[in-house]
Image (cartoon, rainbow, N blue to C red):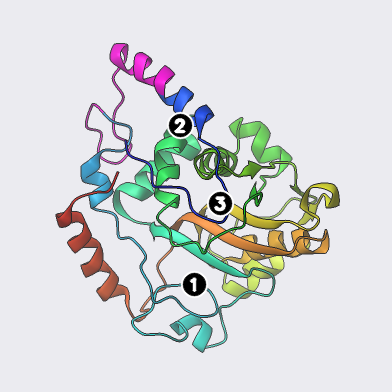
Amino acid sequence: MAVAAAVGHGTVRWPWRYRTRQLVWAVIDLVFPPQCAGCGRAGQRFCSDCQQSLEELKPPFCEDCGYPVAQAGRCLACGQGAGGFTALTGLRSAAFHAGPLRKAIHQLKYHHDGILADSLATRLLAAGLPEAPAGGLVVPVPLSAERLAARGYNQAELLARAYAELRGLRCAPRAARRVRDTETQVGLSVRQRRLNVAKAFAAERRLAGGQSIVLVDDVCTTGATLDSCAAALLEAGAAQVWGLTLARARQPGAKGDDKHREAGAAAGQAGAVL
């Protein structure tokens, strides 16, 4: 599997931890062949056909929230005053939360398939995140203690670690933490989501202070959780916080979606990079 060249200023370390882990799993896979998390086909954890079918998010992006738009400017939600961020510098996502990617994320979150994060993290490299300075910090959005205990791991941390290794950046899972439990965001309006996660996070100044941070999560729906976590990191002295997610929920009726569906299909026919 080819990995994109390192991005950003300065020298990026060779991702030896990632490569070593891949070699170990390659041996295991000879004995126990993996199944694709997107389609179930044997041989790869996330097969090339599923990767080619992803509806990748391409520019231009909304100037407020990073959602793909047909032409430069604001997306439908931000134009109506329902979108935008107060803390995030910006947000980028690899593809829409649909099809094989939705299935793969479900597998990662609920079936203890931690090594799948390595395959999915390579998609983050192509998400169009602006260059980060050498020495930048990668931070996963933390789970609540209760949810972490129930699941046994934080899927955002697995993605963040793999992404940091591929980019040669430092990963700091303890830079942010949840300080209060929140209700599930499913079914809440944009305003309710923001209120639900307001002041739900705190950050460590000794880790976040002065840092340019990439905040990683698996899925962005409205960005309320990411923005609230970014606010805590800024309060702890972070210089800036960019959000980065594997998937982004589609805005109902948003302009530019048809264009991106067509672009995603064309990219699939042209062949995958990975």
The CA span between labels 3 and 2 is 17 Å
Label 1 sits on residue: 66
Under mark 1, the amino acid is Gly
Label 2 sits on residue: 111
Upstream in the sequence, badge 3 or badge 1?
1
Q: Image quadrant for the C terminus? A: top left
Whether residue 90 is visible here, answered yes or no, is yes
Q: Secondary structure at mark 1?
A: loop
Find the magenta span and give its range. Answer: 23-43
> Where residue 88 appears, x then y in whole percent?
64, 68
Please name the residue shown 69% across and 65% down the image: 240
> Where residue 1 appears, x then y in whole percent?
32, 35
Asked if 83 appears above or below 145 in the picture, the reply is: below
Under mark 2, the amino acid is His
Left or right: 191 in relation to 96: right
Please name the residue shown 25% across and 45% down the image: 50
The CA span between labels 1 and 2 is 30 Å
Please name the residue shown 53% across and 56% down the image: 8
Disc number at residue 217? 3
